[in-house]
Amino acid sequence: MRREPGANVIDIKRAMLDEVAALNEGLLAEQGMRMTLSSDDVRYVESSIANVWVNLGLGALFATLVMYAFLRSARATMAGIIGIPICTIAAFLGLLLAGRTLNVISLAGVAFAIGMTIDNTIVVLESVETQRRRGLARFEAALEGVKQVWPAVLASTLTTILVFVPIFFIQQEAGQLYSDIAVAISTSIIISMVVAITVIPTLGAHIDFRGKESASTAAPRWVRGCLWVVNCMIHTAFRRLMAIVLGIAGGIGIFVWLTPPAEYLPEGEEAKTFVSMNAPASYNLATMDAIAQTLQQELEPHVGADPERFERGDTDIPPISTMGIQAEAQSLRIIAETSDPTHIEALMDALTQRFEAYPDMRAFAARGSIISSNDGGTRSITLDIAGNDLNELYTTANAIYQRAQDVFDNPRIQSRPSALDLGQPLIEVYPDWERAAEVGMDTSALGTTVAVLTNGAYLDDFYLDDEKIDLYGYGPGAGNIALDDLATLPIHTPSGINVPLNTLAEIRETVGTATLRRVDGRRSVTLDVIPPRSVALEAGIERMQREVIEAMSDEGTLPANINVTVSGAGDQLDATRQALTGNALIALAIVYLLLVAIFAHWGYPLLILATIPLGAAGGIVGLWLMNTVGAQLPKIGLNAISQPFDMITMLGFLILMGTVVNNPILVVHQARENLRTASMSVRDAVHQAVESRLRPIAMTTLTTLCGLSPLVFLPGEGTELYRGVGAIVLFWAAWHGDCHRYLLTCPDGGRAELEKTKTIGLSEGFIRLGFD
């Protein structure tokens, strides 16, 4: 059975189990048979969804604790987190209205939004409390607090959601995953803005949020430290210039230097393996069945076994929870699940070694996936080898197969067709056209007759009450014709006489291939090469091109009339990356024009967008640290953590493009307000803007960190699908909390008055703002 697009796999499973129970009690019981469940993909989906719910709850809890640590008021904290359930429900409604299903990816989008949704609430809540500390009554403080930050809240909200607009135009399959996250986050952020400017002021007008007031009026030590660094950086024009140049250039340099080779998509891999044994032509069904019996006897003791034997090293086969073996004439397949998900690679290696122990056998193992087919599809390097001469084609394909084995450390390689030799015994029937014409038979009639008498053949179809009925013809001995009897097979001719087949055709015994594959009309062999985990897809493609194809061409071992093309996941990777890059540039332009419209100024948006390179550097540094530290975890008895730089991870940079500017927007907006209403000098305006926004910036940074940490650091089924994008956004938040407020104050603190630059050109205004 295969589910229809959009169908819920969990509902299908429940309905199927009911049907299976009914069959076991009825039809199958009457025949002495029983149907049992041997493999279940739904368990992985259910576990993945459960993990997201747990991480979502933990993120909300941690964010709440951080808010309370800053606010020291239960009432203020409750007001701050009131938007979390509202925005979560709104995200689900948004997914429903957009026609999206509730899956692991969309739920991860809801979880990502937890830390982001309270950012607007924190900004408004802090602004209202600032007005209260200045002596205003609750109602006036609520009104003035919203008025102070309303433009900044609107700008930050719109920039966050508008960067997702181009995502909906990505046609590749990654676009579907992107759009699920985009819908969930965008809906939550929009509603969070509504909550921040309506619910929070309303509560502030009726409830006193203030908690325990400190007896000291001096700023906390960490605030004084931040302000001291700011003053040092904006003290002279040279320092401002150096901070800007080093910040932007350093961010770009770090990003380029540390960006790893890319993967395509995460697999969403289960603790299940599909291992295939491909036999040469000399094997038959009896031989393969005997091999299957031998393997079953060896593997059965490990089903439900004690894991201590494997952990002690007494056996190389880990405990197996379920297993099934299927034998065919030229192949054998095992589908098995491990009791411990971390043991799946060991099981794949053990089964591969046992398969390849048989002479001339080839083995291919892949993990089960909820995103691609169960053949390593998102990490598969596909080589299409085309030529006219089958012998030369198969010889070249075998040479490429062996060269790929030598280039990579234990790659997994599958060929189509599975047997790359011309040793398959074949029977060829060559008609005697003159003799066939004498008895009234043509090519089609003779071919169909031989097929019906030997193995059976499709003849025609008809409709009975709108139901299509296929007709097949079978001879009396179809399927059991001995080779020696083939020549005397009686053929009934249109002339009404029966003649033996050897009077109408010549029968030849030969060898060849049982399967002929064509790609674009040419005879072809396809190799699917899955490099080891230590080699990213992008790096694997480059090595295949350089160390296999080009090297063989230079050595003269790749014939000139053999054409080799690379496709598969590599093509999809390039297409998706190009689409994502193009749409990221469009998103950047949208953000810039939006900020121009909100600030009514061409220069301020450039100051704000100047923080993006540093934010991108923070994300890539975090990903590098995560993989570097994660590789050392086995030394202390923990499982290693490795996060590939896949297309979902790259989405994190698009998200931070909209969120990285939120705190700079606050500082720039407050500095402008200080200049406009308080008649401050530029330096004092910047200093006061940073001082007044440090606390909400610190709160939003820490709540984002705490909200995302469970998604990034807690292992479990399905976490590999969204851990990458969570890591990028999380480490960006940690990085920008320390760096951006310093970089931003440098161009903002030039001696030229900010308001005067409204009258000068774009480039001159930016230069005067930054480098005066």
Image (spheres, grey):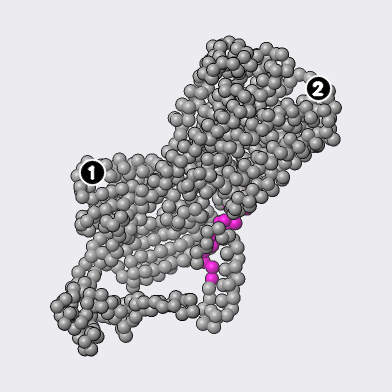
Q: Position of residue 761 (x, y in %)?
A: 54, 17
Relative to 577, is 418 on the left or the right? left
Task: Work out whether 544 lies above or below 200.
Answer: below
Element marked by disc 1 = helix
Nearer-N-terminus badge (2/1): 2
Q: Position of residue 260 (x, y in %)?
A: 44, 36
Relative to 272, is 88 on the left or the right? right
Residue position for label 1? 553
Give the CA separation, mark 2 to mark 1: 78 Å
Residue at screen point 41% across, 42% down: 574
The reply to whether the magenta stretch includes residue 653 is no
Q: Nearer the viewer, residue 221 or 580?
A: 580
Relative to 88, is 594 on the left or the right? left
Magenta span: helix, strand or loop, mainly?
helix
Q: Position of residue 134 (x, y in %)?
A: 81, 22
Residue at screen point 78% across, 32% down: 72
Q: Residue furthest front?
A: 759
Element marked by disc 2 = loop
At label 2, counting other C-alpha atoms closer than 10 Å, the crowd grade (few under 14, some 14-19, many 20 or more) is few
Q: Look at label 2 and name its amino acid.
A: Arg
Q: Position of residue 360 (x, y in %)?
A: 29, 60
Q: Mark 2 vs mark 1: give the one in front.
A: 2
Residue position for label 2? 134
The C terminus sits in image quarter: top right
Give residue 600's quadrant in the image: top right
Q: Residue furthest left?
A: 434
Residue at screen point 55% across, 24% down: 606
Q: Which residues are magenta?
A: 36-53
Residue 257 appears anywhere in the view: yes
At label 1, counting other C-alpha atoms closer than 10 Å, the crowd grade (few under 14, some 14-19, many 20 or more) is few
Q: Look at label 1 and name its amino acid.
A: Ser
Task: Work out whether 118 lies above or below 571.
Answer: above
